[in-house]
């Protein structure tokens, strides 16, 4: 974030990655939605974007890139964002993403820290895209499960961001590569609070239960668990698949929002009425234990 004046700042972010779905157009949509998400998580309004392309021009037909870029720009149009350029390089591995510039009032920025005891935690999208994408690569995912995952990943966090600004949000982050628990741990850093996550309220794709039991989980899930396991206490009755779900690295995941307890249910109700059907209150910010997340 860069302050321009007393009432105007710009937000700049960048993200790109290798394909996580087979269809080029869909990959473009997912990449664009994912790149826009950081601006939405801060409560900002994205305005312009630039393409970032790495493409194996000697081994892949240019029509693939055409479809990727079409998916990206269609998602930008949906978001009301203008594509102003970009840069491409030849690479052995295909990659695509965007740099995004938005605006925000410098005194109204929502950071990923600042949650307060007494807050409720709201999650706006279901978990499990990482596990489903791994099952897809292994040839085990059904068309239905892939369709659910794709619909989730291409969905913008725009409406969720706009609605959260109607409440007194204390902290927000988008749930992406570090998984729900990894990003929740980031929300606790530097704060004298902890969290309690009610696993029974966490939305997830039901198909991932079978995939998890089959061992179809991404490598990033193992890294997330190893890095954060000492900051999390699991109730002995938590099923193993739920542990996987909570550490699963997401692509273009939902927002994790910390709001005063009395405002959480009305905010979720507004989200449901506006089509964010999976939004749910998944836990609490507590005074004790500090710096720890309890999953029950």
Image (cartoon, rainbow, N blue to C red):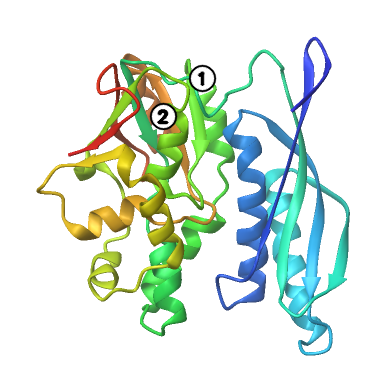
Residue 239 appears left or right of 43: left
Q: Residues within 10 Å of mark 2 (few under 14, many from 20)?
A: some
Residue 145, x across and y down, in percent: 37, 70
Residue 209 appears left or right of 146: left
Q: Residues within 10 Å of mark 1 (few under 14, many from 20)?
A: few
> From the viewer's perspective, is residue 76 above or below residue 26?
above
Residue 216, x across and y down, in percent: 34, 74
Residue 154, x across and y down, in percent: 56, 57
Q: Which residue in the structure is indicated by mark 2?
A: 270
What is the secondary structure assignment of the residue under circle 2?
helix
Q: Which residue in the structure is indicated by mark 1?
A: 166
Question: Residue 12 shows which numbered tag?
Answer: none
Q: Nearest the camera: 57 or 228? A: 228
Q: Dividing the picture into quarters, in which one does residue 183 lie?
A: top left
Q: Dividing the picture into quarters, in which one does residue 242 lie?
A: bottom left
Q: Earlier in the sequence, mark 2 or mark 1?
A: 1
What is the secondary structure assignment of the residue under circle 1?
loop
> From the viewer's perspective, is residue 72 above or below residue 217?
above
Q: Quadrant of the N terminus?
A: top right
Question: What is the tally of numbered marks visible in this picture?
Answer: 2
What is the CA distance from the residue labelled 2 to the residue labelled 1? 10 Å
Residue 274 visible from this viewpoint: no
Residue placed furthest toward the bottom: 59
* Residue that appears at 61% across and 68% down: 26
Asked if disc 2 and disc 1 are in contact, CB closer than 8 Å, the reply is yes
Marks 2, 1: nearer the viewer: 1
Residue 106 visible from this viewpoint: yes
Residue 271, x across and y down, in percent: 42, 34
């Amino acid at each position: 974030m860069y302050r321009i004046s007393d009432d105007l700042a710009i937000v700049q972010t960048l993200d790109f990655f290798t394909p996580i779905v087979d269809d080029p157009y869909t990959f473009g949509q997912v990449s664009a939605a994912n790149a826009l998400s950081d601006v939405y998580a801060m409560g900002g309004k994205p305005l312009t974007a630039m393409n970032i392309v790495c493409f194996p021009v000697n081994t892949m037909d240019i029509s693939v890139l055409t479809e990727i870029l079409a998916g990206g720009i269609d998602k930008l149009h949906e978001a009301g964002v203008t594509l102003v350029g970009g840069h491409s390089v030849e690479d052995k591995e295909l990659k695509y993403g965007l740099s995004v510039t938005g605006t925000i009032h410098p005194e109204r920025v929502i950071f990923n820290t600042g949650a307060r005891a007494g807050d409720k935690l709201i999650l706006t999208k279901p978990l499990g895209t990482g596990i489903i994408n791994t099952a897809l690569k292994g040839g085990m995912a059904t068309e239905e499960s892939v369709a659910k995952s794709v619909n989730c990943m291409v969905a913008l966090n725009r409406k969720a961001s706009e609605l959260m600004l109607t409440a007194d949000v204390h902290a927000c982050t988008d749930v992406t590569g570090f998984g729900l628990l990894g990003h929740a741990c980031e929300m606790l850093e530097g704060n004298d609070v902890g969290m309690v996550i009610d696993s029974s309220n966490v939305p997830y794709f039901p198909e991932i239960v079978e995939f998890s039991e089959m061992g179809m989980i991404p490598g990033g899930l193992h890294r997330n668990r190893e890095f954060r396991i000492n900051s999390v206490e699991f109730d002995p009755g938590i099923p193993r698949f739920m542990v996987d779900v909570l550490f699963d690295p997401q692509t273009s995941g939902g927002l994790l929002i910390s709001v005063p307890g009395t405002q959480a249910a009305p905010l979720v109700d507004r989200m449901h009425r506006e089509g964010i059907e999976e939004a749910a209150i998944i836990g609490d910010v507590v005074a004790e234990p500090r710096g720890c997340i309890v999953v029950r």
